[in-house]
Amino acid sequence: MRGFLNGQFSVAQVYWFGFVLTGLGFTAAYKYINTLFLTTTGDDWDRVETAHYALIAVNLLWVCILLRALVKSAYNNRTPGGWGWIAIALVSLNVLYTSYAAITVYVPSTYAPLSMLRAETREFKKQLPQRMDDTTIMTDVDLRDDVLTYVVRVEFEADDLMQEHLDWDFSTETDSSREICVDLEGYFKAGLKAVSYEFNYTNTTLMAELTAEECTTYLATRN
């Protein structure tokens, strides 16, 4: 391992084994964390969030170490060739992207372009449908017209008061909705208009929405 990180292997070996293969491993780990976010509640959810923060930190540290190893390998008794410069450029871009993504997670008030949210949504969609508990299954997620929409199938009938309950649950009066506002603050700054939830019950479909205006009003009270 020391030789690998000190440039004693070829650029191709460092890139394909260090960057591509471990990148696949990190992707699998992020997918597992996403599944845990959907299926975990209570105090365990906080532990999942901590694991997510730790994974991002390890990922960022690894790509930085890997960039150093790649540069040392490319300059090992020679001047980097074309493929060497391409590999360095690709890993450098990954370091920049991972660093920025980490900042938006650790400091959610940081401006985050909606292109990042679209990329996250596309990856998240690949894991659906996903059962969340005994009666609910998330079936789709989409970012359309700057509205982030989650579609959930609920395996029981909605009563006459369910819409009222949903409107309350997805208002800034509840802690869960306030956390959503905080987590998506950077995207609201970039133009995200709302977070919408479509609940397909066995007898009807109900909607709930948390708008950017509601969130920014709540967030203003925290500053």
Image: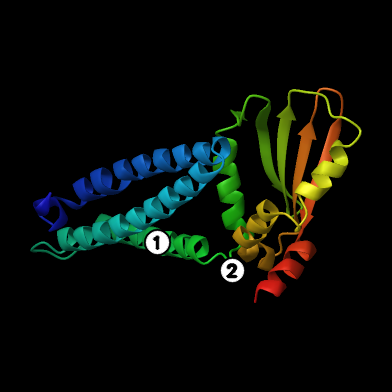
Count the marks: how many? 2
Dot 1 corresponds to which residue?
93
1 or 2: mark nearer the eye = 2
Dot 2 corresponds to which residue?
109
Q: Which quadrant would the C terminus be assigned to in this image?
A: bottom right
Amino acid type at image mark 1: Leu
Residue under the point 24% across and 59% down? 65
Q: Callout 1 environment at 10 Å: few (<14), some (14 to 19), or many (20+)?
A: few
Q: Is residue 6 left or right of residue 34?
A: left
Q: Is residue 158 above or below residue 100?
A: above
Q: Callout 2 environment at 10 Å: few (<14), some (14 to 19), or many (20+)?
A: some
Q: Mark 2 falls on what kind of element?
A: loop
Q: Is residue 82 left or right of residue 202?
A: left
Q: Is residue 109 left or right of residue 199?
A: left
Residue under the point 15% across and 64% down? 75
Using the image as rendered, state which of residue 53 and residue 129 is in the foreground: 53
Q: Is residue 36 left or right of residue 184?
A: left
Q: Are marks 1 and 2 in contact (CB under 8 Å)?
A: no
Give the image location of residue 23, x and y in percent.
35, 45
Residue under the point 12% across and 58% down? 6
Using the image as rendered, state which of residue 59 and residue 118 is in the foreground: 59
Choose top left, top right, bottom left or bottom right for residue 135. Answer: top right
Does residue 212 appear in this view?
yes
Q: Mark 1 falls on what kind of element?
A: helix
Choose top left, top right, bottom left or bottom right for residue 138. Answer: top right
| Gap in angstroms between the C-alphas marked 1 and 2 | 23 Å
Does residue 81 appear in this view?
no
Using the image as rendered, state which of residue 15 and residue 97 is in the foreground: 97
Amino acid type at image mark 2: Ser
Give the image location of residue 57, x and y in percent.
36, 57
Q: Is residue 197 above or below residue 213?
A: above
Give the image location of residue 64, x and y in percent.
29, 61
